[in-house]
Amino acid sequence: MIKYLIWDAGGTLFDTYPAVVEACQAALGGFGKEAPSEWVMALCKQTTSYGIHTLAKTFSLDEETFQQHFKRSYADIGAQCQPPFPGVEAVCRYVCEMGGQNFIVTHRSRPSLEALLTAHRMAQYFTDFITQEDAYPRKPDPAAIEALLVRHALDRSRCLLVGDRDLDIVAGQRAGIHTCFFGSEPHETQPDLEITDYTVLLHWLQAQNVDAHSSV
């Protein structure tokens, strides 16, 4: 029975990519540059840092200055415009109702994550989270996940990591826990579960719960 969910934040819990792309385009526009949105999206889906680095290099911009422009533009968009994916709140609520816990491991900053959780009234569902400020190695290194497992004495066999990128899945697998890939992007990893709709994950968890009780 899966009882503990460890979530990525941007692109997994919250639909942040459109805002990230918009902020990149606004930052580029400040330098009189522009790029196809589809390309910017593809870059930022690898990681936002990678997207910023690649755009700065491509257009011969100072990366630190470009990043500052991006951060200002992104902050102007606001958390309210980056909603949870449909069905994700129902999954988080179900985990809590069955006596489980939700956690987050993200590369984004703590204020940014807290703004998303507060804007969409999601903070109540999460026991703990690890952010950029905690200074763990970035995924796919499993160190941040390992820290949560130890901190809360979690049974690895009852944990499921949910992420939208290969680096999330690899981190979960290296930590020895179950994994779920969310989204339709091509990927090379082989998670335990692949979904494009959180209703599927909810039903899967409910089935796991029923099976666990029927075997007692």
Image (spheres, rainbow, N blue to C red):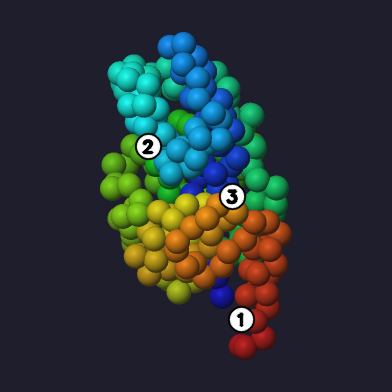
Classify mark 2: residues with Cα within 10 Å, few (<14), some (14-19) or many (20+). Answer: few
Q: Nearer the viewer, residue 216 or 77?
A: 77
For the residue marked with disc 3, what is the amino acid?
Tyr
Whether 161 is drawn above or below 106: the answer is below
Residue 133, percent from left and from top: 33, 37
Q: Name which residue lies at 56% across and 30% down.
A: 37
Q: Name which residue lies at 40% across and 46% down.
A: 130
Q: Is residue 46 visible?
A: yes
Residue 82, percent from left and from top: 61, 34
Q: Which mark is residue 50?
A: 2
For the residue marked with disc 2, what is the amino acid?
Tyr
The residue mark sitting in front, 2 or 1, is 2
Q: Which mark is residue 212?
A: 1
Residue 141, percent from left and from top: 31, 55
Whether 127 is drawn above or below 34: the answer is below
Q: Which is more N-terminal, label 1 or label 2?
A: 2
| Cα distance between the residues tagged 3 and 2 | 30 Å
Query: What residue did someone put label 3 on?
Result: 125
Image check: 144 left or right of 162? left
Q: Name which residue lies at 43% across and 44% down.
A: 46
| Cα distance between the residues tagged 1 and 3 | 23 Å
Q: Quadrant of the N terminus?
A: bottom right
Q: Which is more N-terminal, label 2 or label 3?
A: 2
Classify mark 1: residues with Cα within 10 Å, few (<14), some (14-19) or many (20+). Answer: few
